[in-house]
Amino acid sequence: MIEKLNKAFSKLPGVGSKTAQRFIYHLLERDRLGGLELAKALTDAMEKVKNCEKCRTLTEKNICEICSNDVRDDSQLCIVETPSDIHVIEQSGVYTGKYFVLSGYLSPIDGIGASELGLDELEVLLSNQSVSELILATNATIEGEVTAHYIHNLAKKYQIKTTRIAHGIPLGGELEYTDINTIAHALSGRKDYN
Amino acid sequence: MIEKLNKAFSKLPGVGSKTAQRFIYHLLERDRLGGLELAKALTDAMEKVKNCEKCRTLTEKNICEICSNDVRDDSQLCIVETPSDIHVIEQSGVYTGKYFVLSGYLSPIDGIGASELGLDELEVLLSNQSVSELILATNATIEGEVTAHYIHNLAKKYQIKTTRIAHGIPLGGELEYTDINTIAHALSGRKDYN
Ligand SMILES: [Zn+2]
Ligand SMILES: [Zn+2]
């Protein structure tokens, strides 16, 4: 029973058998209630969290809170690779538009093409003509740049202005591990994509 | 829902909000089944794992596997501070006796006295006369030494030979974080306690 739990914990990113064991003894000896609460929260999340029908971020509603917030600017659409990127940009506090979450980045070698990324849905959004600026906030990695380039070409079809988040972010770095101030700076200093 | 799960994960030792978030997105986006299995394993363990009636280690049975193993030597009893210490000693492969798990170490200032440690139960075991050697494998910390000293006095009452695991273990170190070879060496080189 403890071994089974150890294996389940060890599947989490960055968690080995030794860390798992520390979690388990902590819960069993000091916080069984916390263990049961974690189990309940896990089950709820795994069963009920889905993708927002508009921006595809993770949410328990059909339309997420940002998409259903009328105060936010519909004319700006920021493209990110993951839901956690939204979280980080929101913390920077300088962005008031909407988002669209890709399912990762273009990687033909792994079978991830335009439709796997959700770019078909993005094209529907762009064809609606409500977006006047597309902000590319994909990561400063090779894959992120390739994806940005692809989406830029898509936007051109609909004469939509495209900007790229500024490279205050260290090259090769990922949004999720960047500090808030750098992200605020990179967003404010965004420039035309070409 | 995601925030609730983040809080539950963040209660684990060494896990902050950022690490919790990485766990959550990993599970939601790549391994929902793994998340549900973790929840199930957690619930099972929290509800069913208890303390062995003999040695007090964590087990789902009334008597743990080591205690109910007739091949193991009843005349040797190794005293450890936590169930994970048993796990580490077992991995070293040099010990074939039985164990007794204290509930931590003596710490009068925290209200942990002899009975909280389970020393009453230990004394019952010692008075049975089946133990001929008591091996003190409490940690090489001040608290561990105080506890060892206390138990040594208890054993003297029943004329039981007491040995202390050798200090191949670095001073101030804890068993759980010591490599297997050092532990094997420390066990083999144990000497009379005085
Ligand atoms: Zn949304
Ligand atoms: Zn036992």
Image: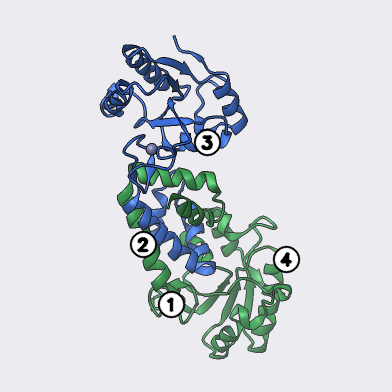
Chain colours: A green, B blue
Q: Is residue A94 visible?
A: no
**Horizontal side, residue B133 vs residue B61: left or right:** right
Give the Cα separation between the discs numbered 2 and 3: 35 Å
Circles 2 and 4: CB atoms closer than 8 Å = no
Give the Cα separation between the discs numbered 3 and 4: 48 Å
Determine which of the numbered discs, if any, sits on residue B81 in the image: none
- The outermost residue toward the top is B194
Q: Residue at horizontal 49%, vertical 78%?
A: A55
The residue identified by callout 4 is A142
- Looking at the image, in which quadrant does ligand 2 appear? top left
Between tags 2 and 1, which lies in front? 2
Secondary structure of the residue carrying tag 3 is helix
The residue identified by callout 3 is B90
Q: Residue at horizontal 64%, vertical 57%?
A: A168
Ligand 1 neighbours mark 1 (CB distance < 8 Å): yes
The residue identified by callout 1 is A67
Most foreground residue, A137 or A160: A137
The kind of residue tagged 2 is: Ala
**Is tag 2's residue or tag 1's residue first in the polypeptide sequence?**
2
Query: Are there few (<14), some (14-19), or many (20+) residues within 10 Å of tag 1?
Result: many
Q: Residue at horizontal 36%, vertical 26%?
A: B105
Most foreground residue, A40 or A86: A40
**Horizontal side, residue B181 vs residue B152: left or right:** right
Secondary structure of the residue carrying tag 4 is helix
Q: Quick check: do tags 2 and 1 share a chain?
A: yes
The residue marked by circle 3 belongs to what chain? B
Most foreground residue, B98 or B190: B98
**Horizontal side, residue B32 vs residue A164: left or right:** left
The kind of residue tagged 4 is: Ile
| A49 lies above or below B147 | below
Q: Quadrant of residue B75?
A: top left
Q: Quick check: do tags 2 and 3 share a chain?
A: no
